[in-house]
Amino acid sequence: QYCQKWSSDVNSLAICTSYRLFKHKFEMEEYLLDLPLRDRICLAKFRTGNIKIPVNILRYALVPREERRCELCGDHDLGDEFHYLLQCRYFSQERSLYLKKYYFTRPNVLKFYEVVNSKNVGSLRNLAKFIRIVSHAF
């Protein structure tokens, strides 16, 4: 019953919009065992919508989701996890240091899923480093 409620909540709550793109089953993630504590915390916060980006910060100011825009790159796209991880021009130099070019060349939901759900410890550590850079910009 708990798993059914979890699934229902993830699929119905607006706060879970990005989360439902990469989390499909209620199970422990391997990165929680494989990574150093600092990286585990960073990835867990990112995955659960607990990092400082407009889509999360402006939720508390009751700004409608579609108005929580990125002010860093000038594109005024929705300032969500997908945008900052794979699209935002403001972080293009850092992104090229920490993520494989494949992910941010013509980004899409499948690439977002792949990078967030990587099983490669090195890739996950780099992802955590990049997420820390993004979150410190706010």
Image (cartoon, rainbow, N blue to C red):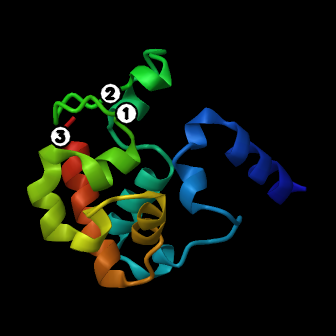
Q: Nearer the viewer, residue 58 or 70?
A: 70
Left or right side of 65 for 36: left
Q: Which mark is residue 65?
A: none
Pointer 2 or 1: first along the chain: 2
For this orientation, the residue located farthest to the left is 93
Residue shown at the point (22%, 35%) measured from the top left: 138
State the residue at coordinates (12%, 59%).
94
User: Which of pointers 3 and 1 indicates the residue nearer the eye?
Assistant: 1
Residue 72, image quadrant: top left
Q: Which residue is mark 2?
A: 69
Query: Callout 1: helix, strand or loop?
Result: loop
Q: Amino acid at mark 1?
A: Leu
**Dot 3: element:** loop
Task: Check contact, mark 2 vs mark 1: CB within 8 A.
Answer: yes
The quarter of the picture where the N terminus appears is bottom right
Residue receiving disc 3: 137
How far apart, in angstroms, are the residues tagged by discs 3 and 1?
A: 16 Å
Type of the residue with mark 2: Arg
Q: Residue drawn at (38%, 84%), measured in percent from left and top? A: 120
The tag earlier along the polypeptide, 2 or 3, is 2
When the figure is inspected, residue 9 is found, relative to residue 2, above or below; the finding is: above
| Residue nearest the viewer, comparing 68 with 122 | 68
Quarter-wise, where is residue 26 in the image? bottom right
Task: Determine crowd level at label 1: few under 14, some 14-19, many 20+ residues with C-alpha closer than 10 A.
Answer: some
How many discs appear?
3
Name the disc covering residue 78, or none.
1
Q: Is residue 60 left or right of residue 73?
A: right
The percent position of residue 25, horizontal first and vertical second, equals 70, 66
Dot 3 amino acid type: Ala
